[in-house]
Amino acid sequence: MPLRGLRSPEPFDSLSDAKKAGLFSPNYELCQVLKLGLSLVLFEVSQYTLGARRSDRVGYAAPVAEAATKIYQFDIQVNNVSRLCHAKPIVTVNGRFPGPTVYVREGDTVQINVTNHAQYNMSIHWHGLKQFRNGWADGPAYITQCPIQSGSSYMYNFNVTGQRGTLWWHAHILWLRATVYGAIVIMPKQGTPFPFQRPASEEILVFGEWWHADVEEVVKQGNSLGLPPNMSDAHTINGKPGPLFPCSEKHTFAMEVEKGKTYLLRIINAALNDELFFAIAGHNLTVVEIDAVYTKPFTTSAILIAPGQTTNVLVHANQMPGRYFMAVRPFIDAPIPIDNKTATAIFQYKGTLNTVLPTLPHLPTPNDTTFALSYNKKLKSLNTPRFPANVPLKVDRNLFFTVGLGMNPCSSCVNGTRLTASLNNITFVMPQIGLLQAHYFNTKGVFRTDFPDKPPTPFNYTGAPLTANLGTKKGTRLVRLAFNSTVELVIQDTNLLTVESHPFHLHGYNFFVVGTGIGNFDPKNDPAKYNLIDPPERNTVGVPTGGWTAIRFTADNPGVWFFHCHLELHTGWGLKTAFVVDNGKQADQTVLPPPKDLPQC
C-alpha cells in the first residue's frame, strides 16, 4: 500500500516548482493565469513562501514580509469517486475530496473566488474565522448571502485578524458539506513560535462520513417521511475509510514518521452527525489547541471531537518501529441507535514494511460519558500575557436557551407527523433572502428580533421523557444584541422525546465555555462554580446529553451571525437562530458595505 499523506507544503526553490504546486509570484500576469483555468491557484503578494525554510511551516521563520494577499480559485464541480466497492458522482472543489487546504498567515488578506459548475446552489463557510464587520464573507446560505447559483461566481474577500491555528471550510447549504470541505491552516505571524514544543513536521487529519447513495436524495427521502435520513455507510479519515471496510485497502490514509521525532496533528471533525473519539495505537496525544486557540497542554490516550470542532495534538514517535492504526469511532451516550463504524488510517514508522499488520488502539466505548466529561474538563485556555483569556466578568444580557426535539403535523408523513427541533420551542424558518442583506438595507418583513431570552414555560428539563404536546412554534425570529454588550448564554438540553448531546456553533465569534453540568441548570448555585480564569475558548461547544453549557462573549462584531446545532440533521429540523448585533458609534464599529458581486436570490 503506498504511503499517501497531506503534508504541509514544502518550500519552493524555483518558480517552476511553485507552478507545479499551484503557487505563483504576483509578478506574473494574474489574468493570464486565470485564463489557464487552473483548478487551484495561490498567489503570494509577498515573496516569503518562495525559497522559505521548511521551518516556516511550523512557525519559526525569520521575519520578512508581515502580510500578504492570498488568492485561491475554488471550482465547484461534480466528479466520480469510488469508495466501498462503489463509484458515484459527488460535488467537489477542484475535483478533490477532501478539498484543498487553505494556507494563510495571521494578518493576511484572503480572496477566494468560488465558481459553481454543479447543479446545486452553493455557499462556502469559513468555519471559525471571525470576519470582523464582514459577514458578507461568512458564507451560510440565506443568513449572510444568497447562494451562488449554478454557472455563477462569488469572491469571498476577508482578512485574518488576531487568529492563528487550525480551522476549516465547508459548504453551508443543504447537506453538501458531506463532500465539500477542507482545512484552513493559519500560521502565526512571522517570527512567532508556537507556545509548545517545536514539531518536526505536521499532518492534517479531517474526519468525515460517506454514503453509498446520493446524500441529497437520502435527505429528501427522510424529509418526505418526516423521519431521520439513513445513517452514513462509513466514516473517513482524509476521505478514506480504511482497511476495516470492504474494497478499502487502497483507500487508506497513511503518514510516515521517524522514531524519536514529534509531530503536530491538525484534526478536524467534518462529520455531519457524529461526535468522534480518536486515538493512535500505543501513542499518547498532547492537546495544545482547540478551535484555533492555544490550550494548556495535557496528555491523553484519546481525544473527543464534535462536528465543527478542531483539535491540534502533539504525538511523539517513541514506540518500536512498526505500523499503528489511527482510529475514529462515534461517541453516543443517548438512547438512540448507535453508529459503531470505525474508520482507520496508518501511523507508520520509516523503514517498516507495508506487510506488517497494524495494531488497533483502545478507544473509549461508544457510550463512555465518564471519559467525555473528564476530557472536556481538562480543556483550559493558556491565559498568558501573550495569549490572555479576556473572559467577560460582568454580564449585560443573560440568555437561557432550551434545546428540544418535537413533532409537528404533516399529512403526507409517516404517522401524520414530522420530526422537528427547536430553541425555546421555536423552530427556525429559513428566509428567502439573506438576513444580513435584509438587516443592512432595513428590508421589512424578512425577520423579527423578538426571539425570547428564556423558554416560554419552565419545566423539569431533564426529567422523565416528555412525549406529549411536542408541537413547536415556527418563525424567523432572531436575538438582537447591543454593540459591545457582554452576553451569557446557557444552553440546556431537554428530554423532549430524548436527551442528546448537541454541538453548537456561533458564527462571527469565539466564546468562553465558563461552565457545564449534568441535569438542570441552577441559576442560583451553578454560576458560583464557573471557571472565569482560564476557561476554554472556542467557536463550537458540545452541550452534554441531559445537561447544560454556559458560554460568555462580548458582542463586538456587528452584523447577523448564525447560531446553530452542528449536527446537520438537527440544523435541517430547525435547531438554529441568529444574533443581530447592532452597529457601534464609530465608523470602524459598523458593518462594511456589501461587495458588488454579492449573489442575489
Image (cartoon, grey):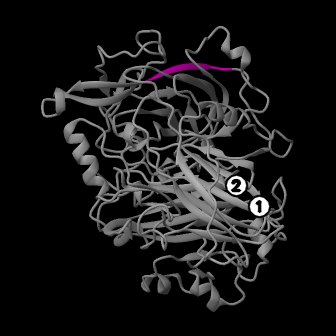
Location of residue 551 with respect to 589 vertically, above or below: above
Tell which of 517 and 308 is nearer to you.
Answer: 517
How many neighbours does mark 2 have within 10 angstroms: few (below 14), some (14-19), or many (20 or more)? many
Horizontal side of residue 461 vs 163, given as left or right? left
Q: Which residue corresponds to mark 2?
A: 164
Q: Amino acid at mark 1?
A: Lys
Magenta region, residue range: 395-403
Q: Which residue appears at 52% of the width and 37% of the height? A: 503
Residue 160 visible in rendering: no
Location of residue 136 with respect to 33 vertically, above or below: above
Q: Which residue corresponds to mark 1?
A: 189
Tell which of 82 and 10 is nearer to you.
Answer: 82
Element type at marker 1? Answer: loop
Horizontal side of residue 236 vs 110, given as left or right? left
- Residue 400 drawn in magenta: yes
- Where residue 379 sits in the image (x, y, percent)? 72, 38
- Where residue 95 sits in the image (x, y, percent)? 42, 73
Q: Disc 2 vs disc 1: Cβ atoms closer than 8 Å?
A: yes
Q: Amino acid at mark 2?
A: Arg
